[in-house]
Image (cartoon, grey):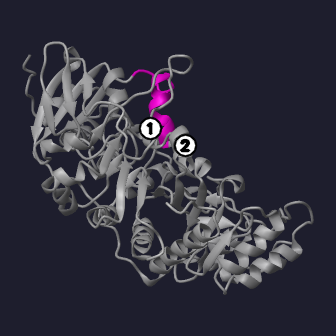
C-alpha cells in the first residue's frame, strides 16, 4: 500500500479550528517540524481574515520554536500539555492567553489513554524510515520517543513527516513499548537492567488512518547549552564529592547506581564532573534525556549504558551518533516517556535523581517552574517522576541569580513542585545540604549554613528567630518577604522583616 505524498502546506490545510493534535518527539528532538511551520502561517492568515483558528497541542515533553513559539506568537494555541521551556510560549501563557496544564511527563500517555484530554484528532509523527503495508505501517522514529506509540494508536488521523535529515539507522536505538491497561491487563515492565529492550524498534500505525506522508529534510532545532561557568563547575564538583562520600560510607553500592540528570547546562556540568572524578566507577544512565556530555562519556567508556527518551543534543553530536551506530546501538536505548519515567523502573534500578531548581526553601521544599509564584518559567517536566521515586533525590541550583539580587534559598517557596518529603539533598556552588534523617530545624540550619549565599545567611537566620515556634516554624506575615522585597525594590538583600511584623 503506497501512502499519499502531500506537501506540508497541504497537510496544514487539513487541520481544522479547535482540533487536538498529538506529536511525537521529546524536547526539541524528534518533533515534527514541517507541518507546523505551515500551520502557524495558516493561523495568521485565518486571523487576518477574521476567522477563528486555534488548536490543542499534546506532546511528550517540551518541543521547539516551530511548534510552541511560532504558534503562540500566532495566537493559535488553545490548550497545551504537559511541558514547555519556550520563551514565546511562556510570554503568551503568562498573559493568560493559553490554557496550559503543567503535568508529570511520565503520566502523559496514560492520561491520554484514559480520555482525560478528549479525542485526539491528529497525530503527527516524525520518522527516519517507513515500511508501508496493506494492514500495518511500521514507522521508525528519529532522535526521540515521547508519546508516539500512544498518540499514533489513539488519533483519528495520522500525518507522517518522513524527515530525510535523519539516518534510517536511528531505528537501531529505539525500544517502543506501551503498558497494558490498569488492572490484570497490566504486567510489570520487564526492565531489569538499564540497557534492556522489551518492545519493538518501530511503532505500529493503522495504514487506513494515514492521510499523507510529508517528505522533508529539516535539521533538528537543536539547543546548544551554555558553556560551563565556575559556578556550574563547582556544583558539579560538589555533587561528585557527595556521591563519593556516600559510596565510601556504604550508602551507595561499590558498583555504583544509574544516574538521571535533568536538561540544561547544570546537568551537563554534573555529568562532566562525575566523569572526571577518579573515585567514581564507570556508571550507567537511566534518564529522560542524554545530552552532549553524556554522548561524549559513552564514547569514552565512562558511561557504559544509557537509556533515555531523547537525544537532546546538537546536530553535530547527533551526526556523531549516526556515523558510529555500530558502537552506539550497544550502549544507548531510546524509549517512550512513560517507560523512561516509570516509578516502577526508577525504583527497581535505584536511580540517583539529579534535577535543577529555581529556588528551595529552608525546609527543603522546591520550586522548579514559577518565578515569584505567578510567572511561568517552564514546566516541571519529569523531575518529580524521578525525585519522588529515586534512590537519592538531589536538586541543584546556583545560590543566587541576577547578580546576587535574588536568593535561591528562601524562607518559603513561592510555588512548590517537589515537597520536603521528596527532597534528600540540595546542592549549590556554596556546598551540600544532606537532609536525610533530619527534622525541620536541623534541615533549615543545614541548608542555610551549607547552601545559602553568605549575603543571605544572616537574613535567613533572622527569619528562623522571628518565626512562630512549632514543628516547622514559619511567620505567615514574613514568609514571602524575600519575593515581595524583590518585586518592590529589585533586591532581596534589602529585606527588612520589621516591615512585615508591624
Q: Residue at x 53, y 63 (%)?
A: 254
Q: Is residue 117 magenta?
A: yes
Q: Which residues are magenta?
A: 105-119
Magenta stretch, main secondary structure class: helix
Q: Residue at x 63, y 59 (%)?
A: 366
Vertical side of 478 occupied by 201: above or below: above
Q: Is residue 280 magenta?
A: no
Question: Is residue 9 visible to the viewer in this orientation of the structure?
Answer: no
Rendering coords of residue 160 (x, y %): 19, 31
Badge 2 crowding class, 10 Å Cα cut-off, few under 14, some 14 to 19, many 20 or more, is some
Rendering coords of residue 412 (x, y %): 72, 64
Q: Residue furthest front?
A: 254
The residue that label 2 is drawn on is: 348
Q: Is residue 7 left or right of residue 342?
A: left
The residue that label 1 is drawn on is: 191
Snapshot quadrant of residue 5: top left
Q: Out of 39 and 186, give the one closest to the viewer.
A: 186
As helix, strand or loop, the secondary structure at mark 1 comes to loop
Amino acid at each position: 500500500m503506497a501512502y499519499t505524498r502531500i506537501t506540508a502546506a497541504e497537510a496544514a490545510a487539513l487541520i481544522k479550528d479547535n482540533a487536538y493534535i498529538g506529536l511525537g518527539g521529546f524536547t526539541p528532538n524528534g518533533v515534527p517540524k514541517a507541518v507546523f511551520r505551515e500551520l502557524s502561517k495558516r493561523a495568521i492568515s485565518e486571523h487576518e481574515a477574521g476567522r477563528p483558528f486555534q488548536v490543542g497541542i499534546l506532546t511528550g515533553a517540551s518541543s521547539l520554536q516551530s511548534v510552541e513559539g511560532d504558534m503562540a506568537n500566532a495566537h493559535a494555541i488553545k490548550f497545551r500539555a504537559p511541558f514547555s521551556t519556550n520563551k514565546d510560549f511562556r510570554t503568551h501563557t503568562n498573559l493568560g492567553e493559553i490554557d496550559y496544564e503543567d503535568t508529570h511527563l511520565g503520566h502523559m500517555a496514560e492520561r491520554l489513554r484514559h480520555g482525560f484530554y478528549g479525542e485526539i484528532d491528529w497525530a503527527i509523527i516524525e520518522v527516519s524510515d517507513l515500511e508501508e503495508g496493506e494492514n500495518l505501517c511500521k514507522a521508525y522514529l528519529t532522535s526521540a520517543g515521547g508519546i508516539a506509540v500512544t498518540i499514533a494508536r489513539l488519533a483519528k488521523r495520522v500525518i507522517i513527516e518522513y524527515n530525510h535529515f535523519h539516518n534510517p539507522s536511528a531505528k537501531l536505538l529505539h525500544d517502543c513499548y506501551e503498558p497494558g491497561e490498569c488492572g490484570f491487563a497490566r504486567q510489570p515492565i520487564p526492565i531489569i537492567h538499564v540497557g534492556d529492550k522489551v518492545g519493538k524498534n518501530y511503532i505500529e500505525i493503522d495504514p487506513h488512518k494515514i492521510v499523507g506522508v510529508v517528505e522533508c529534510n529539516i535539521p533538528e532545532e537543536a539547543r546548544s547549552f551554555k558553556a560551563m561557568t565556575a559556578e556550574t563547575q563547582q556544583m558539579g564538583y560538589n555533587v561528585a564529592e557527595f556521591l563519593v562520600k556516600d559510596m565510601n560510607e556504604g550508602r551507595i553500592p561499590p558498583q555504583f547506581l544509574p544516574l538521571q540528570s535533568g536538561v540544561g547546562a547544570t546537568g551537563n556540568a554534573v555529568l562532566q564532573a562525575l566523569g572526571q572524578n577518579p573515585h567514581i566507577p564507570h556508571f550507567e544512565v537511566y534518564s529522560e534525556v542524554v545530552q552532549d556530555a553524556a554522548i561524549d562519556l559513552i564514547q569514552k567508556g565512562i558511561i557504559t549504558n544509557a537509556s533515555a527518551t531523547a537525544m537532546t543534543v546538537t546536530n553535530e553530536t547527533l551526526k556523531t551518533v549516526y556515523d558510529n551506530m555500530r558502537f552506539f546501538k550497544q550502549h544507548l536505548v531510546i524509549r517512550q516517556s512513560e517507560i523512561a519515567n516509570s516509578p516502577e523502573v526508577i525504583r527497581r534500578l535505584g536511580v540517583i535523581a539529579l534535577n535543577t531548581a529555581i529556588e528551595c526553601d529552608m525546609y527543603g521544599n522546591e520550586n522548579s517552574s514559577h518565578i515569584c509564584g505567578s510567572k511561568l518559567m517552564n514546566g516541571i517536566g519529569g523531575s518529580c517522576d524521578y525525585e519522588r521515586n529515586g534512590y537519592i533525590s538531589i536538586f541543584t541550583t546556583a545560590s543566587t541569580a541576577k547578580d546576587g539580587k535574588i536568593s535561591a534559598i528562601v524562607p518559603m517557596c513561592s510555588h512548590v513542585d517537589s515537597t520536603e518529603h521528596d527532597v534528600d539533598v540540595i546542592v549549590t556552588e556554596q556546598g551540600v545540604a544532606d537532609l536525610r534523617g533530619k527534622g525541620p530545624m536541623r534541615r533549615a540550619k543545614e541548608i542555610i549554613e551549607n547552601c545559602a549565599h553568605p549575603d543571605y545567611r544572616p537574613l535567613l537566620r533572622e527569619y528562623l528567630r522571628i518565626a512562630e515556634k512549632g514543628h516547622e516554624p514559619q511567620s505567615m506575615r514574613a514568609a514571602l518577604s524575600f519575593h515581595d522585597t524583590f518585586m518592590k525594590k529589585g533586591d532581596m538583600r534589602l529585606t527588612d522583616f520589621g516591615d512585615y511584623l508591624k
